[in-house]
Image (spheres, rainbow, N blue to C red):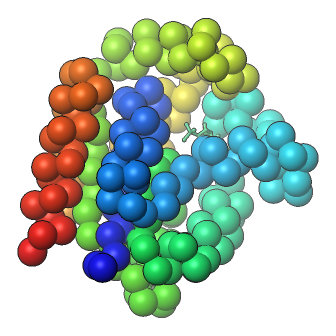
Amino acid sequence: MNKKRLIFLGPPGAGKGTQAKILADYLEVPHISTGEILRKAKQDGTPVGLKAKAYMDRGDLVPDIVLQELVQERLQQEDTKNQGWILDGFPRTLFQAKFLEKLLPEINQECDLIINLTVADEVLVGRLAKRAALEGRSDDTEEVIRNRLVVYQQETAPLIDFYQQHLVTVDGDRSLDLITIELKSITKKDFSN
Ligand code: AMP
């Protein structure tokens, strides 16, 4: 079976995590959410979690060096080496994108597809507030939500230009099912040649 490697970009609240999980099941590849890995590390009180906590609670980005080590290790585990991966929430800065661009050829991997899930800001605030009520995440208070959106615009949105030619843009302001159908069709086209 061909390995499939995808990057998922998009602002917080765009539905990246949900769609990345569905697509990972569909394509039978590991779903790598750096946010989930960091939340787990925080809960378990590991050294990485302790380092990340204050940044995450404020809605700021965890320092690049922490992510760099975490992703480098995760992409070389057996499951990702054999099946591929969907990266959800990484890269989030130009530094991380450049790091990944350098790392992949070094470990004999290549990214096949970069998907950018777009949603307007007003819609995002409403969605994040709803998720806060449902999941009780400590980084989903209104102040932190606003900061996460500012951080996204400053640090992550520039990646859209960085990846410009390779990017497939998907409108995330539709029903979950419609978005999934489009994503499946994009990946099917891409992975059938
Ligand atoms: P997420 O679940 O992807 O929204 O991530 C939750 C939080 O984890 C973010 O607000 C950041 O504090 C941290 N985080 C996740 N991925 C990254 C990353 N690639 N770079 C820096 N911080 C990250």
**Which residue corresponds to the image point at 44% horizontal and 45% vertical from the top-left?**
21
Picture coordinates of residue 140, whole percent (x, y): 62, 19
Above or below, 130 relative to 140: above
Above or below, 184 relative to 143: below
**Which residue corresponds to the image point at 69% horizontal and 17% vertical from the top-left?**
136
Q: Which quadrant is home to the C terminus?
A: bottom left
Could you say which quadrant of the image residue 135 lies in? top right
Could you say which quadrant of the image residue 102 lies in? bottom left
Task: Give the image quadrant in which the ligand numbered 1 is located.
Answer: top right
Q: Is residue 48 left or right of residue 80?
A: right
Above or below, 178 relative to 104: above
Q: Nearer the viewer, residue 141 or 26?
A: 26
Above or below, 54 relative to 92: above
**Which residue corresponds to the image point at 51% horizontal and 10% vertical from the top-left?**
130
Picture coordinates of residue 80, whole percent (x, y): 51, 73
Picture coordinates of residue 43, whole percent (x, y): 83, 40
**Which residue corresponds to the image point at 42% horizontal and 89% vertical from the top-left?**
108
Q: Nearer the viewer, residue 63 or 113?
A: 113
Is residue 98 something one can see in this rendering? Answer: no
Picture coordinates of residue 90, whole percent (x, y): 49, 55
Could you say which quadrant of the image residue 60 lies in? top right
Q: Is residue 58 left or right of residue 186?
A: right
Q: Which quadrant is home to the N terminus?
A: bottom left
Q: Is residue 151 left or right of residue 174?
A: right
